[in-house]
Image: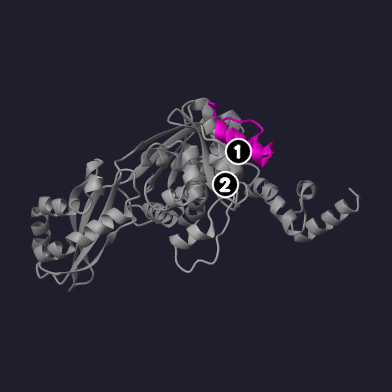
Amino acid sequence: MSSTSRIPGFKDLGVDARRAHVAAMSGLSLVDLAVLDPAHGLGLEQADRMVENVVGVLGVPVGIATNFVVDGREVLVPMATEEASVVAAASNLARMARPHGGFVSSATAPLMQAQVQVLDVADPVAGRVRLLEAREELMALADEQDPALVRHGGGARDVVVRLVPVNAEKTFVVLHLVVDVRDAMGANAVNTMAEAIAARVAEIAGGRSLLRILTNKADLRVTRVRAVFGAEQLGGPQVVDDMVSAAAFAVADPYRAATHNKGIMNGVTAVVLATGNDTRAVEAGAHSHAVGPDGRYSSLSRFEKTADGHLVGTLELPMAVGLVGGATKVHPVARANVAITGARSAAELASLVVSVGLAQNAAALRALASEGIQRGHMSLHARNVAVSAGAVGEEVDAVASAMVNAKTIGADAAGALLARHRAGLD
């Protein structure tokens, strides 16, 4: 079995050859990977059981990010995305991190929170204290709802009570139930617990419960990743300095931060989607995390220059992903993709996700600080333009290459170049 995610020339292989490499690296068989073929993936019958009013399924390309070493483990990372250059960019920066040990992660416990909103409490300050006094009772009541989770080492861990003023006359009492959800994303578990304790919470507080649902601001379930990227591989000391300056711009300016963070999520969302996890929950958690204590939206990542002149990047994200429940078990392609990663826990999967986000972010910064973002992106996008113009087979690469060489990428150029190619004029 292959033991490295460093596969030179992987992009130049055919699909079958790439699958063979993935099978060898992951220990899976080609039969296991057959679900990656649209003809054998998610079928209408399965889809009809997943959501309502099904009329079909939507295919999204799944690419493999190579070169990743995460916490000392060689790993191939599946990414589901329609955007050109994302997989290549992440793989390229992962290659640059390899000589310096790859990506190193740390994480908090897998803690999710459910909120129980209580209205019409006459004495909210005292009501908060009464709820805190009942902490053990409420946690025990919550644990009764999910004995399987408790058997696996999870369950309620704490009760936090906040007073949320609405105006001068009204204050909500909001109880947070903190739950260790182990290897699950955790939404169903914490929502069930919140429903079960809501009546008792209202009774103790002396009010009426309204909302009882998780929060996707998963700031107690955080994964941190760091990596060092070699200065010479990046393009030299000036590129490093310019990347640090570009990153500082995103820290200081919310307009820049929005696009900077979108670049991070290009990588994060692609892995989350590929593994059948909840992209909307992860996106919501990430963007809420980008708002600091001062209420200002800022960059999720930080980049600095090391003492020896290399670039070090760090990224911290709430990462509510799981290996059990939901589409991770129902969707056949998601199951195969999880198996490809070799992740043995939700924490390991989270580390891979955030590592790809950091690599993708570093790749975008490098492009911005050197040749500009469009050059590499449009070179890969040229293939899509060629297909849109009607190119098939070997025509796709021929027309795409001609557009790149002419530095003119667009529908009109693709059509004209395709006509010349078919007429044998090039």
Return the residue nearer the eye: 51 or 345: 51
Mark 2: which secondary structure?
Answer: helix
- 237 to 147, vertically: above or below: above
Q: Position of residue 87 (x, y in %)?
A: 58, 43
Identify the residue at the far bottom of this view.
169
In this view of the protein, can residue 274 be seen by the observer? no
Q: Amino acid at mark 2?
A: Leu
Residue 36's tag is: 2
Q: State the residue at coordinates (78%, 46%).
A: 394
Mark 1: which secondary structure?
Answer: helix
Residue 19's tag is: 1
Residue 245's tag is: none
Q: Amino acid at mark 1?
A: Arg
**Image check: 292 left or right of 388?**
left
Alpha carbons under labels 2 and 1: distance apart: 9 Å
Label 2 neighbour load within 10 Å: few <14, some 14-19, many 20+ = some
State the extent of the magenta-drawn residues as a range: 1-24
Q: Position of residue 35 (x, y in %)?
A: 55, 47
In this view of the protein, can residue 134 be seen by the observer? yes
Q: State the residue at coordinates (54%, 67%).
A: 55
Mark 2 and mark 1 residues within 8 Å of each other at the beta carbon:
yes
- 166 to 342, vertically: above or below: below
In this picture the colour scheme is: one colour
- 213 to 157, vertically: above or below: below
Q: State the residue at coordinates (13%, 62%).
A: 200
Quarter placement of the N terminus: top right
